[in-house]
């Protein structure tokens, strides 16, 4: 048997919220497979083998002989035993087709396990060049047929003599992606219900002494009025804080949905064993001392996680502060926070427990309501991906706020966030923005791919609103939870003081919001109701004498103006006007409007409650920043949906030949000629070029290509040629070429083993186009200012592969250097569309050659018509199999 492919191990969530382990079959699975087949009902055996007299031993032998390529067997583990098998066998007559078969234990049938195994097996098959599955299904086997029909694949079936021949193309269509996303959301929602809607909660580690974590959690559950049944586990007490206590969780007479564990870390593993024996569905592990402490703690955490996953449970933590659900029908406060939030429409997740305590206090001061709160701690199991999918369908949540320190599966996060963001805003603050985390890399693209730049790209593609501080996070959250989205960037400012209005106008310009002139009818109506000295432009300055009635009328007039998308109302309390009356007037003026209204009550007392539901900010800059974030999100929601367009002039056979030849040598940097040939095979134009190992060869090559040419030093040790003066431009004759050769030799020394002779391309705008395989985020595509300016200007943008046409357009438009493409100071405009096309072709190249580690086209010279790759560097190596993961594979 070939080497065991651990990269195909994954944990999945079934339709009922329980977890299963999927992995390739192992040589020692014989007894477990025999046990699985022996447990099958006669009907399941009949459906699997069509009544043929095949023996279990024959089937087991076949499965154990799988080679992990032409024949692959995927098994499902649940509750410590094998509960399913999915196999494919390549058709020797057609190497891109394989016959597929499934065996699912009777107890797991109808829970979506077969469909999830089909998803994973199809991914494995695609990795091995298989494009079609064939299956033979008895006409009465409705459950198996539903697995194929509900998968989202474009299934074809034909009935012959009572057996359906089912053909399944494995291409990832939009329908398949939508169905898979729907299954993922259902499963995540089901698996979270035991946390947020438990009927019975047990606190393990509660103490009779107040002030300890366990006793405070129990007290908060009691004090908060938890509507379900509550018990404590204590070795000797009969009750704690009026709550019944038992010595072990296994002594609880009723089923337990949720156990909150707050015992010393050395005892957690034993407590988890007890919970598994009891059949507890969900765990919140408050205890610290795990992965956050180092290697030993990480090993203990993985041991516990493996137990949890094997048992089909879910776990929040460890090293967390608990969870809250303010739903009046649940009233769950399983935290040790001294502050209980009020009910509201904002869901919040934090990786930092200590920060979570401060945040709960902060939101209470802001009078912001929370629907659910989760401190995920070390995120060993449940992460933001699970929670976002749960909140997507939660009718009590309108806005999702996240404090992130790291990503478990960032590409999956982007996919989920993009879908959820279409109907609910996600606002996130991501710590660790410094450049200190940038990894060392050989290429420009690799060096520029600092993690924070990639996080920006991820959030931008997914429509996640990124904030820089916790304060801004809640500023934006308050606006989104209380006001409609802006329909555009046009803002009106209404104030009773000129200075704050000017600050607001400056902030709007800085945030790319517009202050349009008001409609003539609006200005005329304002003049009628305001003093003659008032300014009725935009901003509108009503003067310090403005009355509540004037605030109400002006607010209503501005919101009725078709040139206004949102309104910022500023109030500085003078001696003659009461704040509560003005607040009441602003709220009345905004009533019934579908445009967002924000306020600045610039006072030590803040905004009076009469202003609700209009959010108020201490200073104009904070209000405008929040409004800008909401406006950007609204524009993202309204944008057209991008697609991956078909491309011509692709030569996948040529691409694979170049890649395989380099891989056969152990990988590494392609020669300049091969690098140019690789991008040329994906349809990117390159300037005619050839390598020359000697001065004479260079002269001969230049004669063939035609002068003028460029001479570039080449050699394995030469990375950035410009740093050693390794490029000589505009070489116009043979004498100049020979001089250039000797100059390069003198500059590069022994590092120069050859030179690239290339046709000289005049004019144009130089850009960088590149790609890098990031160890966390996967393949990335880059675009930025090129040539020698790439490092100096820092004008580079990234997107996660694969790119849509919209992604590519947005990448180009976001560059500072985009103005150069559109003509600048007399220069003709360049072909911007050629840049978009080149980006899409690089993304396509990553599909055809996933072994690319780094790719630089620098410069990609954009001409009036088309563009040319002038310098190409590509590093290729086989992708190492990742270590076995315990992340959920949604």
Image (cartoon, rainbow, N blue to C red):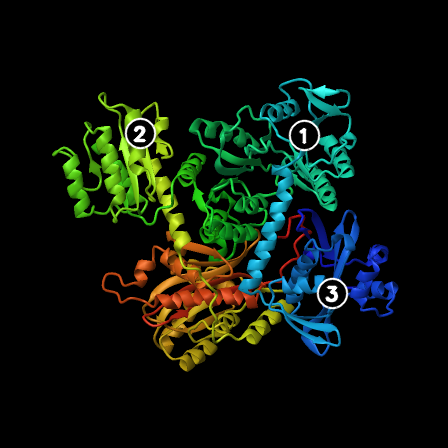
720 with respect to 301 (left or right): left
Neighbor class of circle 3 (other Cα within 10 Å; few <14, some 14-19, many 20+) is some
Give yes or no for contact between labels 2 and 1 (Cβ–Cβ under 8 Å).
no
Q: Earlier in the sequence, mark 3 or mark 2?
A: 3
Alpha-carbon span between mark 3 and mark 2: 66 Å
* Element carrying mark 3: loop
Give yes or no for contact between labels 3 and 2 (Cβ–Cβ under 8 Å).
no
Alpha-carbon span between mark 3 and mark 1: 43 Å
584, 105: nearer the viewer: 584
The image shows residue 584, relative to residue 438, as above or below, that is: above
Which residue shows up at 39% across the image and 49% down it? Answer: 634
Which residue shows up at 77% across the image and 58% down it? Answer: 25
Neighbor class of circle 2 (other Cα within 10 Å; few <14, some 14-19, many 20+) is some
Q: From the image, tell me which residue sits under label 3.
A: 141
Q: From the image, tell me which residue sits under label 2.
A: 584
Q: From the image, tell me which residue sits under label 1.
A: 229
């Amino acid at each position: 048997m070939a080497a065991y492919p651990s990269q195909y191990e994954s944990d999945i969530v079934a339709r009922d919220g329980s977890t299963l382990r999927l992995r390739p079959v192992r040589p020692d699975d014989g007894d477990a497979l025999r046990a699985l087949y022996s447990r099958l009902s006669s009907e399941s055996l009949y459906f699997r083998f069509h009544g043929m007299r095949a023996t279990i031993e024959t089937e087991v032998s076949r499965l154990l002989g799988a080679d992990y390529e032409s024949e692959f067997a995927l098994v499902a583990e649940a509750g410590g035993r094998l509960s399913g098998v999915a196999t494919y066998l390549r058709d020797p007559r057609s190497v891109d087709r394989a016959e597929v078969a499934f065996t699912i234990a009777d107890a797991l049938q109808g829970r979506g396990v077969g469909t999830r195994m089909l998803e994973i097996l199809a991914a494995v098959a695609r990795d091995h060049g298989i494009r079609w599955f064939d299956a033979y299904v008895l006409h009465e086997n409705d459950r198996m047929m539903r697995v194929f029909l509900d998968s989202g694949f474009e299934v074809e079936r034909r009935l012959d003599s009572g057996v359906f021949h089912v053909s399944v193309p494995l291409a990832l269509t939009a329908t398949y992606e939508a169905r898979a996303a729907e299954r993922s959301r259902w499963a995540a929602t089901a698996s979270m219900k035991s946390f947020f809607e438990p009927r019975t909660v047990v606190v393990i580690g509660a103490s009779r002494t107040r002030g300890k974590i366990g006793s405070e959690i129990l007290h908060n559950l009691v004090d908060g009025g938890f509507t379900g049944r509550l018990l404590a586990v204590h070795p000797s007490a009969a009750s704690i804080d009026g709550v019944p206590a038992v010595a072990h969780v296994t002594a609880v007479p009723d089923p337990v949905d949720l156990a909150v564990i707050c015992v010393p870390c050395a005892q957690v593993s034993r407590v988890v064993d007890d919970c598994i024996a009891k059949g507890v569905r969900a765990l919140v592990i408050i205890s610290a001392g795990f992965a956050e402490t180092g290697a030993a703690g990480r090993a203990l955490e993985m041991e516990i996680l493996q137990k949890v996953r094997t048992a089909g449970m879910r776990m929040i933590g460890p090293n967390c502060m608990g969870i809250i659900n303010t739903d009046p029908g649940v009233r769950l406060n399983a935290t040790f926070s001294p502050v209980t939030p009020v009910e509201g429409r904002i869901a919040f997740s934090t990786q930092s427990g200590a920060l979570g305590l401060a945040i709960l206090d902060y939101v209470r001061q802001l009078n912001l309501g929370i629907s659910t709160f989760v401190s995920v701690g070390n995120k060993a199991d449940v992460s933001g991906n699970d929670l976002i999918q749960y909140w997507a369908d939660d009718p009590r949540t309108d806005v999702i706020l996240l404090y992130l320190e790291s990503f478990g599966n960032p590409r999956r996060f982007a996919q989920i966030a993009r879908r959820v963001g279409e109907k609910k805003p996600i606002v996130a603050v991501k710590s660790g923005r410094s450049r200190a985390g940038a990894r060392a890399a050989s290429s420009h693209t690799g060096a520029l791919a600092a993690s924070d730049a990639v996080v920006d790209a991820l959030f931008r593609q997914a429509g996640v609103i990124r904030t820089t501080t916790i304060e801004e996070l809640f500023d934006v959250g308050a606006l989104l939870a209380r006001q409609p989205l802006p329909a555009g960037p046009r803002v009106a400012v209404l104030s009773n003081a000129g200075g704050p209005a000017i600050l607001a106008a400056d902030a709007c310009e800085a945030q790319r919001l517009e202050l349009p002139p008001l409609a003539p009818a609006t200005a005329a109506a304002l003049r009628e109701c305001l003093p003659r000295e008032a300014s009725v432009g935009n901003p509108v300055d009503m003067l310090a004498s403005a009355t509540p009635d004037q605030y109400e009328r002006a607010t209503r007039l501005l919101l009725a103006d078709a040139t206004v998308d949102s309104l910022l109302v500023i109030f500085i309390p003078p001696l003659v006007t009461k704040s509560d009356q003005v607040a009441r007037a602003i709220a009345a003026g905004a009533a019934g409007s579908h445009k967002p209204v924000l306020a600045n009550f610039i006072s030590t007392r803040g905004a009076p409650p009469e202003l609700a539901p209009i959010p108020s900010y201490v200073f104009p800059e904070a209000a405008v920043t929040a409004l800008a974030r909401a406006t950007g999100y609204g524009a993202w929601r309204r944008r057209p949906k991008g697609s991956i367009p078909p491309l011509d002039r692709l030569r996948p056979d040529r691409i694979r030949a170049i890649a395989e030849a380099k891989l056969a040598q152990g990988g590494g940097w392609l020669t300049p000629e091969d690098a140019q040939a690789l991008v040329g095979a994906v349809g990117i134009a390159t300037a005619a070029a050839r390598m020359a190992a000697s001065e004479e060869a260079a002269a001969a090559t230049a004669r063939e290509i035609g002068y003028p040419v460029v001479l570039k030093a080449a050699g394995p040790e030469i990375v950035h040629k410009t740093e050693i003066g390794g490029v000589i431009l505009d070489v116009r004759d043979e004498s100049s070429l020979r001089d250039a050769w000797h100059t390069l030799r003198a500059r590069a020394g022994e590092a120069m083993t050859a030179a690239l002779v290339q046709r000289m391309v005049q004019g144009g705008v130089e850009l960088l186009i590149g790609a890098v395989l990031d160890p966390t985020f996967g393949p990335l595509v880059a675009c930025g200012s090129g040539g020698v300016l790439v490092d100096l200007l820092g004008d580079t943008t990234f997107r996660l592969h694969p790119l849509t046409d919209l992604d590519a357009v947005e990448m180009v438009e976001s560059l500072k250097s985009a103005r150069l493409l559109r003509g600048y100071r007399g220069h003709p405009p360049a072909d911007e569309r050629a840049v978009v096309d080149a980006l899409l072709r690089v993304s396509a190249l990553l599909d055809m050659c996933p072994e690319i580690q780094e790719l630089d086209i620098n410069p990609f010279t954009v001409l009036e018509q088309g563009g040319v790759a002038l310098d190409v560097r590509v590093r290729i190596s086989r992708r190492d199999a990742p270590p076995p993961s315990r992340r959920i594979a949604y």
